């Protein structure tokens, strides 16, 4: 038996588990009450399936980490941060035009979501322990610099991209999104920034109504954004066909880090979307992105749960992503 076979085990390198998963009450509290689709049970549903698959034995289980206002302000305006803090105390009103209600503690919960993703980036960039990380309650891709949107308060994906640019001087960060909804907060936040290699497959014609194929970036970033609107009911075969375009796009642009938003609302049976994937599409994307990460960016990839409102779907899809991360 060669030395590589001796030191490599499933999910480990030199005795270290190469993937971290962030689990804890702090991010579980990010959810909306009174029957809202983005309810408070989503973290627990993920965790139950995670435990059923015995994945805790194959990953590092990390506690959520707080993001201070300096971190939040890497993407969000100070006025908006203060608005969230204020409404978080009262728990009354909306953080946008009517989709995203305030609740008591929303500022704290959203800050832990952001902080956990940023902490994962730090651990991965150190390069001596983990290569990959997954945060189930994260991927809040609709939030804009100055407002919430679509159940998303702070845009953890956009913040961590900005953080990687500022702290580590990275020049090519790939953002890949397979949520049923277009990642408009990330897209428009970096529409003119060629450092963000943006690829998004999403259901055509639903909220937020953006992400047409002709939207390829503006200014010097033109051609660095790939939007693929998918038809009503698109299935695993259609996903696999379009996925080859994503891989070609990423390999052409040679990312240094990958952020993967793997919303499960693109699976068949979601109550608020109309797509037809199974968890196989999420597993395929995760597996192929890990290969690209290993070949191009020292294995560096973060997965975020994103949307998903059929609880069985999100449990299966997200845990299938984790399984591919540890292989």
Image (spheres, rainbow, N blue to C red):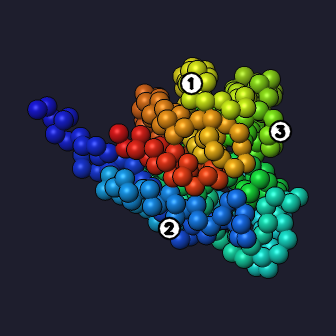
- Image position of 234 (left or right of 248): right
Name the residue that disc number 1 marks.
Answer: 237
In the rendered image, which quarter contains the N terminus?
top left
Q: Is residue 174 above or below residue 162?
A: above
**CB of mark 3 within 8 Å of CB of mark 2?**
no
Circle on res. 24? 2
- Image position of 271 (left or right of 312): right
**What is the spatial separation of the Cα atoms under label 3 and label 2, in whole angstroms?**
33 Å
The quarter holding residue 70 reads bottom right
Judge whether residue 202 can be spotted in this image: no
Residue neighbourhood size for the residue with mark 3, other residues' Cα within 10 Å, grouped as few (<14), some (14–19), many (≥20): few
Judge whether residue 213 can be spotted in this image: yes
**What is the spatial separation of the Cα atoms under label 1 and label 2, in whole angstroms?**
35 Å
Name the residue that disc number 3 marks.
Answer: 209
In the rendered image, which quarter contains the C terminus?
top left
Q: Residue at x 76, y 79 (%)?
A: 89
Q: Earlier in the sequence, mark 1 or mark 3?
A: 3
Question: In the current view of this chain or complex, which residue is farthest to the front?
Answer: 269
């Amino acid at each position: 038996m060669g030395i590589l076979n001796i030191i490599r085990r499933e999910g480990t390198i030199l005795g270290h588990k190469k993937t971290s998963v962030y689990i804890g009450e702090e991010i579980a509290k990010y959810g909306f009450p009174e029957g809202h689709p983005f309810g408070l049970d989503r973290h627990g549903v993920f965790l139950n399936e995670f435990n059923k698959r015995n994945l805790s034995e194959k990953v590092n289980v990390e506690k959520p980490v707080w993001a201070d206002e300096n971190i939040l302000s890497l993407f969000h305006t100070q006025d908006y941060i203060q608005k969230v803090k204020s409404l978080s105390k009262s728990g009354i009103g909306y953080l946008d035009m009517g989709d995203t209600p305030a609740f008591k503690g929303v500022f704290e919960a959203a800050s832990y979501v952001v902080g956990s993703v940023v902490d994962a980036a730090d651990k991965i960039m150190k390069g001596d322990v983990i290569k990959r990380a997954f945060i189930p309650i994260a991927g809040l891709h609709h939030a804009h610099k100055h407002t919430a949107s679509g159940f998303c308060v702070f845009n953890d994906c956009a913040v961590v991209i900005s953080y990687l640019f500022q702290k580590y001087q990275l020049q090519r960060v790939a953002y890949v999104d397979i949520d049923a909804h277009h990642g408009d907060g990330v897209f428009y936040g970096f529409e003119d920034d060629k450092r963000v290699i943006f690829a998004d497959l999403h259901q055509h014609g639903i909220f937020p109504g953006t992400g047409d194929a002709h939207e390829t970036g503006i200014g010097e970033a033109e051609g660095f954004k790939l939007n693929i609107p998918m038809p009503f009911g698109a299935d695993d075969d259609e996903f696999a066909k379009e996925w080859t375009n994503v891989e070609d796009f990423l390999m052409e642009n040679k990312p240094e880090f990958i952020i993967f938003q793997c919303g499960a609302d693109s699976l068949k049976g979601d109550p608020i979307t109309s797509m037809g994937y199974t968890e196989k599409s999420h597993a395929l994307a995760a597996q192929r992105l890990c290969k690209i990460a290993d070949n191009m960016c020292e294995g560096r990839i973060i997965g975020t749960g994103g949307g998903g409102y059929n609880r069985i779907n999100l449990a299966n899809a997200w845990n299938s992503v984790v399984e591919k991360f540890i292989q």
